[in-house]
Image (cartoon, coloured by chain):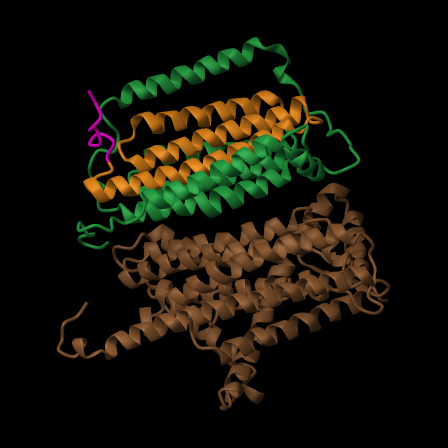
Amino acid sequence: MTGLQIVFIAVGVITFAAAVMVVVSRNLVHAALWLILALAGVAVLFVILEAGFLAIVQVAVYIDAIAILIIVTVMLTRHAMRDDEPQLNKTWIWSALAAILLFGGLLFLFNQVPDLVAQAAPLVETDDTYLEILGKSLVDVDRFVIPFEVASVLLLAAMIGAIVVARPPSSSSQEGGQE
Amino acid sequence: MIPLTWYLILSAAVFCVGLFGVLARRNAVAILMGIELMLNAVNINLVAFWRYLSSEVISGQVFVIIVFAVAAAEAAVGLALIISIYRRKRTISADDINLMKW
Amino acid sequence: MGDPFSLIANWLLDLLVGFGLELEFTKVLLKFLGAGLMGTVAMLLMLFTIWLERKIVARIQDRLGPNRVGPYGIFQTVADLLKLLTKEVLVPSGADRFVFIIAPMLVVMSVVGLWAVVPFAPTLFGTDVNVGVLYLVSIGSIGTLGIMMAGLSSNNKFALLGAFRTVAMMLSYAVPMILALLVPTMLAGSMGLVDIVEAQSSMWFVVLAPVTTLIFFISSIAEVGRAPFDLLEADSEIVAGFHIEYSGLSFGMFFVAEFLHAFTISALTATLFFGGWQGPGAEAYPILGFIYFLIKTGLVYFVVIWFRGTFPRIRIDQLNTLNWKLLVPLGLAAVVFTAVIDKWAAEQDLSRVLMHLAGNALLVVLTLFALRAYARSARKKEEAIRSELMKPSHVSGAGD
């Protein structure tokens, strides 16, 4: 057992446990905090996989933006559901069955393909660093500039849509009791 | 060192947990948290495949960046919709938001 | 003799390897030791800088400041911290206990984590991450999360208001900060802080991009939450905001984290724009580089304290206007101007400096025109309202 394997097992167990706590937590604020732990675990996994830039972007996008959005929404809608109501719906046993079946199916699939037990070859040495290659490929006309531009248009559309949808109703029906 | 299958098993496990969260929870925000877990599991999968099988082709990392952008856009719009529904119907339980059911 | 940092590091490495430990394990152990030392020194430095700040703010306000405990009041901070340590940590009933305890730790963690990438001297830095600038942004925003958790978990309406104000302010001001951080990245060709400092060997970036320096400085002060942007803990408005319910060591952690963050952003401004450890003779004698770095950080920190003692507190709507109507468009324009001029002036000599200065001067002139137009339209609106109010039809009480 090398050091890296021990680190991977520890991080993997933490991420999985945090994911399970997200879906079974009764209190939504606690669920959001467990989600932040799971996202941080995924960032550490990216560092183990030697994709450092993606790890930092994971922290910046998920933990610093999406997690805060989720917590603010939980705060704004806190009075909708009391904590003592059942938080799983009527058909939860079928969902659990579906999830377990999917997991079993995926494990079976991994056994079928033989060269998935591959070990990691050292990273190919290139002239530029991986960060530079990534940056150049995102604006290269022959490579990925179109998905890049489409993603930025998507973000603009999402921003405008979110602002319009979440605007407080300006008509006669004013917001009643404030939080 | 670490075989590729360990990463794939972890990613499949987190994906299935997220799937259970989406299908079984009543609160709309909790459903969104399950969706974020599923997207993160897919990201682990993509980066593991990039690293082990084709580390000289940068498209693996580009795919992950596009998934980041899509996840951020979807979280923003989803949460805006939830807030809007809460304002109008005073509930965010997925069982009660059923006006369009046949 | 000029490089004590490498001397000490190599001596320790030889000592531990001589004890029989293997090389890799010793290097990891030395890294942990270095991290612990850096955190401890950062915290101990606060004992000095808090006293300095209280003295300077007092002199700006024409009074003496702490002068009882020790000569010139030097031990006042020690006395304050001893008092905070001996106070009871109260967790309010109905508060979320675990989140309440964890929140100050997250805030301190995010601030101390920023020190890991700052290069103090040519051979003294925590680590050379090649995405250092993005690391600054992402680790700095974990502090926002901690403050929000602190406000949410106290069972208190004022704390909740403070938490919402925090999210609004800190997330808004992160946008011009990120835009301003793009400019040193473009000018140096790399995101790593060590590369940015080394690229300033010919000319500091404050000469090449003065508008960006101002934008980064102002938005960093807003990110910290210091005056004039301290409506997070405005005593007269929301009774200390997110840290109402905190007492004892938990409050001490918030207190130290805020001052340490102010010192950290002074260090970051000095590194990114004022050349870090660059100076005459710094490459040959790294100890000189360290001294230059401390001098520059001290000067920027003095300006931060000066801001605190001079400006009144900004209102929330003035804050939003300043951010979204001034800083963000200015930041975007600065990025575009810098990119265009950098492509145009390909050589690395005086003509490049002059062209960047000309671009920035053009930007300032355009901003002043825009501000004049905005001020005129605001004044016209105000005069229209005032002349409406003065009309005799309104005196009888018929309102709009």
Residue A38 visible, this angle? no
Where, by quadrant of the figure, is residue A51 drawn? top right
| Chain identity for the colour brown used in the image | C
Specify the quadrant that holds the N terminus of chain A: top right
Residue closer to the observer: C255 or C314: C314
Task: Decide: is C63 above or below C396.
Answer: below
Q: Position of residue B5 (x, y in %)?
A: 57, 20
**Letter of the orange chain:** B
Farthest-out residue, top: A112
**Left of C192 or right of it: where is C53?**
left
Would residue C344 be seen by someone viewing this image from the given angle? yes
Q: Is residue C110 left or right of residue C242?
A: right
Total residue callouts = 0
Classify residue A76 as left or right of residue C373.
Answer: left
Residue at figure coordinates x 17%, y 52% from the top left: A176
In the picture as drawn, the residue positioned furthest to the front comes out as: C392
